[in-house]
Image (tube, rainbow, N blue to C red):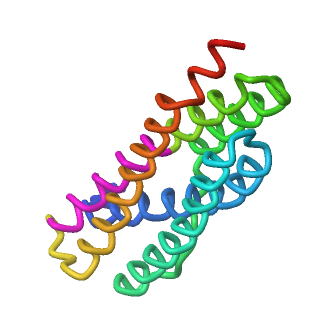
Amino acid sequence: MAQTEKTLEDLFLILMQDTYSAEKQVLRALGKMERAAESERLAAALDAHRAETEGQIERLQQIFELLGKPARGKPCEAMQSMLDEADEILQEFKGSEALDAGLIAAQQAVEHYEITRYGTLKSWAEELGLTEAVPLLGQTLEEERKTDAILSLLAKERVNVEAAEA
């Protein structure tokens, strides 16, 4: 029996499903991280990213529509592992000066994962001629990069210093 040949379009759909699942997992986790954050600026940054994440999920749904496929996630185990790690940090460091530094590190791991996913999806969309999907993916990619930069700035300006001085 001949194996069906898989295409870049098949791979694109699988990565879309994985990313959709990941974003929904992140959306649920951001509220918990926001409530746990000691720094008001970190809580505000996480809240702002939660709102952005809702828009990112909507953009993914638009792309599924363009593909004529249902917006359905394929469980993203990599994201679940990162969020489990964030939860461990939250439990272990709750009430300590190091909590926010740990939350930032955990969220930046998530952002870096998302940056690689959206970069890949955007490149593949270009290759596949999915011209309407490219700007949607590009917008999300820029949001993820911006969130990563904000988290880095918060860490350098205050959070890491406070954690080190405690």
Q: In the visual, does 143 lie left or right of 27?
A: left
* Between 52 and 165, the one nearer to me in the picture: 165
Q: In the visual, does 121 lie left or right of 85?
A: left
Give the mark count.
0
User: Which secondary structure is most common in the magenta stretch?
Assistant: helix
Q: Residue at x 35, y 82 (%)?
A: 67
Rendering coords of residue 19 (x, y %): 48, 58
Q: Residue at x 61, y 44 (%)?
A: 77
Q: In the visual, does 88 lie left or right of 58?
A: right
The quarter of the picture where residue 60 lies is bottom left
Task: Indicate yes or no whether the magenta region holds residue 150.
Answer: no
Please determine whether, in this image, residue 64 is positioned above or below residue 86.
below
Please determine whether, in this image, residue 98 is positioned above or below residue 112.
above
Quarter of the picture holding the C terminus: top right
> What residue span does the magenta drawing correspond to?
111-126
Rendering coords of residue 6 (x, y %): 30, 59
* Between 142 and 23, the one nearer to me in the picture: 142
Quarter of the picture holding the N terminus: bottom left
